[in-house]
Image (cartoon, helix red, strand yellow):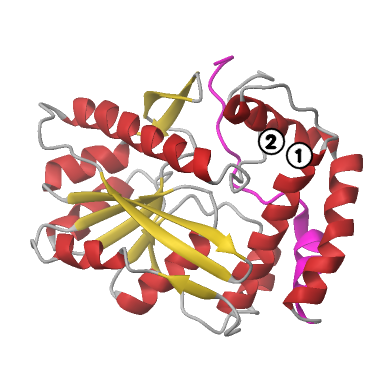
């Protein structure tokens, strides 16, 4: 890894890019997919700096060279656009998006143990759709995240919502966040957050696609101290309009310390992530210098 790279927390494309996706959705999902084909082509041809990180990822997952201007990169950008359209349609109350969420039974089983449940996710597939399903099935579930989005973009997205999203508990960039998360877990609540992006602060190292990467330490340390169950949730698009969830348990029971739990948890997290990405390689949505090549 060429140096520590922290995610900025802001969307690529800005206000007008977000507004364009919302406008596309008004004509319906299938017509929106058709127009997306041209939007994705423009993105690949004229936003090469943004596409370069996804080409690097595709080269790592496929084991061969991938250029920024290529059908492989185009496929990933198109998939990313589909995920935005699907997510917006889902939260707007569109009935076209279906989710096979049988893995949520594992969350209920873990919660029944009475020790709290930490759910870890990644920026892959339909992760936002999974959060909506979580809010519907477990209304007291809370989300922790680094919400650094510009206010006008957040307001624009929120204006299109018809479905509820989980409560936002706190932000790990706030020094009090681990305390709030620990208290919630000790109270038996479900707390969810992403763990694939280094947003600054303490982090644990892990291997991922042949490189050293980092995951925030705080969630694993909080779960270990609270004695909570840790589950890793995935939500991938199986076909147009249909998503499927998967659940993997992260075992911290043998860890001797909070630091050990962070190292072990991060290793398990990225191992699981790599396994599923080999099955759904085009549903990875980290459009920044994730592996630190540009640092």
- Residue sitting at x 39%, y 52%: 193
Q: Mark 2 points at which residue?
A: 54
Residue 23, can we see it?
Answer: no
State the residue position of label 1: 73
Residue name at image x 52 percent, y 54 percent: 147
Q: In which quarter of the image is residue 186?
A: bottom left
Quadrant in which residue 295 is drawn: top right
Up/down of 80 relative to 187, above or below: above
Q: Distance between the residues labelled 2 and 1?
A: 7 Å
Give the residue displayed 23% in from the left and 62% down from the top: 106
- Is residue 171 something one can see in this rendering? yes
Q: What range is drawn magenta here? A: 1-26
Horizontal and vertical percent position of residue 200: 47, 33
Q: Earlier in the sequence, mark 2 or mark 1?
A: 2
Q: Do the residues labelled 2 and 1 touch (CB within 8 Å)?
A: yes
- Looking at the rendered structure, the secondary structure element under dot 2 is helix
| Viewer-side residue, 212 vs 16 | 212
Left or right: residue 58 versus residue 143 is right
Side of 20 where 201 appears, left or right: left
| Residue 33 position in % (x across, y down) | 78, 67
Q: What's the mark number on residue 59?
A: none
Give the answer, above or below, for where 206 lies relative to 173. Answer: above
Q: Does the magenta stretch include residue 248?
A: no
Q: Residue at x 80, y 28 (%)?
A: 67
Front residue (pair 252, 182): 252
Q: Is mark 1 on a helix, strand or loop?
A: helix
Count neighbours of disc 2 (C-alpha within 10 A) and say few if under 14, some if 14 to 19, many if 20 or more: many
């Amino acid at each position: 890894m060429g140096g520590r790279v922290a995610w900025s927390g802001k969307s690529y494309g800005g206000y007008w890019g977000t507004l364009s996706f919302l406008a596309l959705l008004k004509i319906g999902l299938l017509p929106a997919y058709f127009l997306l084909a041209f939007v994705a082509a423009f993105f690949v041809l004229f936003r090469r700096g943004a596409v370069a990180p996804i080409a690097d990822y595709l080269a790592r997952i496929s084991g061969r060279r991938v250029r920024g201007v290529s059908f492989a990169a185009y496929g990933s950008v198109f998939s990313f656009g589909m995920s935005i359209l699907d997510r917006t349609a889902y939260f707007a109350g569109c009935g076209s998006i279906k989710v096979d969420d049988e893995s949520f039974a594992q969350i209920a089983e873990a919660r029944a143990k009475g020790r709290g449940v930490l759910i870890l996710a990644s920026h892959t597939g339909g992760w936002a759709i999974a959060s909506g399903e979580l809010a519907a099935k477990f209304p007291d579930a809370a989300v922790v995240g680094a919400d650094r989005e510009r206010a006008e973009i957040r307001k624009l997205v929120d204006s299109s919502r018809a479905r509820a999203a989980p409560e936002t508990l706190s932000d790990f960039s706030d020094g009090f966040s681990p305390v709030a998360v620990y208290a919630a877990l000790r109270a038996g609540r479900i707390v969810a957050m992403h763990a694939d992006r280094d947003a600054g602060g303490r982090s644990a190292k892990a291997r991922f696609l042949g490189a050293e990467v980092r995951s925030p330490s705080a969630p694993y340390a909080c779960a270990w101290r609270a004695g909570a169950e840790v589950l890793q949730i995935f939500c991938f698009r199986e076909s147009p309009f249909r998503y499927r969830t998967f659940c993997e348990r992260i075992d911290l029971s043998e860890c001797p310390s909070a630091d050990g739990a962070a190292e072990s948890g991060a290793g398990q997290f990225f191992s699981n992530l790599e396994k599923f990405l080999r099955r759904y390689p085009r549903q990875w949505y980290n459009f920044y210098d994730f592996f630190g090549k540009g640092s």
